[in-house]
Image: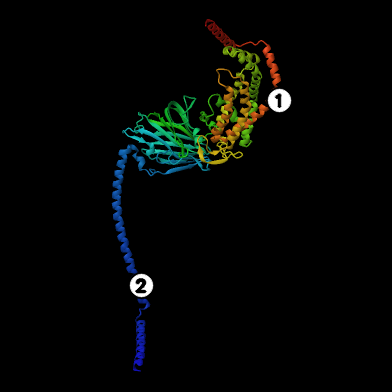
Amino acid sequence: MEEKKFDLNSIIGFVLIFGILLYMLWQNQPTPEELAEQEKAKQEQIDAEKKEEAVKKTEDTFVTSSENFSNTSAADSVQLESLKNKLGAFAYASTLSSATDKTTEVKTDVLDLKFSNKGGYISEVKLKKFVDYDSLPIYIIKDGNAAFNINFPTTDNRILNTQDLYFQPSVTKNGENTVVSMKLKVSETKFLEYRYELKPDDYMIGFSIQSKGLANVINSSNEINLDWKLNTYRHDQSITYENRYTRLTYQYEEDKIDKLAQAGEDEETEKDVKWISYRQHFFSSILVADKPFKTVKLTSKDLVEDEEIDTVFTKQFTSKIPLSFASGELNEPLRLYFGPTDSKTLKQYGDNLEESIPFGWGIFGWINKALFIPLFSFLSSFLPYGIAIIVMTVLIKLLMSFVQYKQFLSQAKMKILKPELEAIKEKYKDNKMKAQQETMALQNKAGASPLSGCLPALIQLPVFYALFMFFPTAFALRQKSFLWADDLSSYDVIAELPFNIPLYGSHVSLFPILAAIAIFFYMKMTTGQQAMAQPTQEGMPDMAKMMKYMIYFSPLLMLFFFNQYASGLSLYYFISNLISIGIMLVIKNYIIDEDKVLAKIEVNKAKPKKQNKFQKRMADMMEQAEQQKKAQQRKK
């Protein structure tokens, strides 16, 4: 009982004590005025601490800045001295704000260009209106594939390269044209300048190299060269096919055109060079001089050794061009072309730039320029490109049909004369000279010389070769589709092979197959008949057997060789041979009557045939040989 009471009293006591404490705390709490004073004092202490910290930071910064300023000034002085020792007067260019690897971008309607501060040259060229076989933009220059450098000596015995020095860029307007000036400065008034002028819708860029106030800086008494180098990018579906038409071409001595080797490595030194073309099949980089370069060293190197591995570049071109000085200063007015290898485009700039396109030499090039290019341009202006090829083929074959007529007529005559020719061969089997003499006499009287069948074929060769050169270089065909062919300037594909066949490729093209079949049947009709008509002579090759081999060899050659060629060319040969077969059938069945030909031969044989000088000389020589042979036999 006592214990419970103690517990209850203890609890009451604790409660009273706790209540008294709360009362005392409430009585002794600070007044609002006292709280305000305390808060003010606290804030003043915080502000004082911040001020002390700021002062300390300012002092530290001042000390650090002073030390850095002192160190930077010393470093700049050492660096400037080092630049002067290395670059001489051109050290000034490296102290300017432009002494960085930045580029200046300029865009026109057809070109996107970048100009590099380091070297002052065009470091990127994009052709805006074209894409490659994989629908990617066409870049002629990008990622360091080109170099444009002047190597020059200075009067203080240094050898410098502009590609290592920094140019100061500026972009201004000259009417509608954009002018980009890149200056390599010795001072604000003395410099070497690359000046580019771009027209809004033009692939040709006005370009000049000129100096001001450098007569006492550059040693112009020594040779100073401009080195222009380009690794040509691959743009076509077949790198091997594109590489075949990627070549360095140039004009020299006023109107002479020449080119470096198509494959391997080649080097040439020429005088009075007017322009240099780095042709990448359908796109070109051309440097044109207002006044011809005195002597230029040109090189070409094939970069494709294995088309499965070497898939980026096709060739490497270089030109070493000496620059001329007047009164110690440079002034070289030039032009730069970056654009399509299109005859119509290049022709508008003059200077025979279209001759950089391989139309073919001599009469073959003349046929292309005078006939096929204008004809195809006219037809393709209102017809789809594939249809234009077919129509042009029909027109050409109709124009050449008289040649086929002469060829078939000659074969018909030889076929009719074959029994008589075999009889002569049998009659004079022991006297080959006499057999040959009688054979020629019979053919002469009948007007059926074997050569009369060869001549028409020779007449067709210039046309054949001209078209062979026309289709691979026809820029208008690039990326134009027809039937299953996506690009008439490249091969068509109907099947991809899981392996590569040497000389054939890793794909199957249908147009070459169709052309090969058409050639087989055409040769079967013509070459086979000619072989039958031609008698075999002792001591001479068996022409019948050789022609039989050609019937099978020619289609195989077409099948393999043209599998990676332009499908437009294969389309032409396919249509051409189909039309030739049709013309042959018409001539054979409706125009040439063998009975009438035979009757005419008999009439000709009855007439005295006057020999020309060549025939008479040949007959006399054969007669003399026959007499000598008889004399030798009598002596024996």
Q: Which residue is at a point 32% across and 68% down the rendered structure image? A: 45
Amino acid at circle 2:
Glu
**Which residue lies most toward the bottom here?**
1
Residue 465 visible in the snapshot: yes
Residue 80 is left or right of residue 416, and the answer is left
At mark 2, the secondary structure is helix
Amino acid at circle 1:
Tyr
Residue named by callout 2: 39
Q: How crowded is mark 2: few (under 14 residues within 10 Å), some or many (20 or more)?
A: few
Give the image's coloring scheme.
rainbow
Residue 123 is left or right of residue 457, and the answer is left
Pick the front one: 329 or 473: 473
Q: In which quarter of the image is the N terminus?
A: bottom left
Q: Which residue is at a point 53% across and 27% down the rendered structure image? A: 360
Residue 160 place in picture, x, y as percent: 35, 35
Q: Which residue is at a point 46% across and 24% down the rendered structure image? A: 253
At mark 1, the secondary structure is helix
Residue 280 place in picture, x, y as percent: 49, 35
Residue named by callout 1: 590
Q: How crowded is mark 1: few (under 14 residues within 10 Å), some or many (20 or more)?
A: few
Residue 526 place in picture, x, y as percent: 63, 25
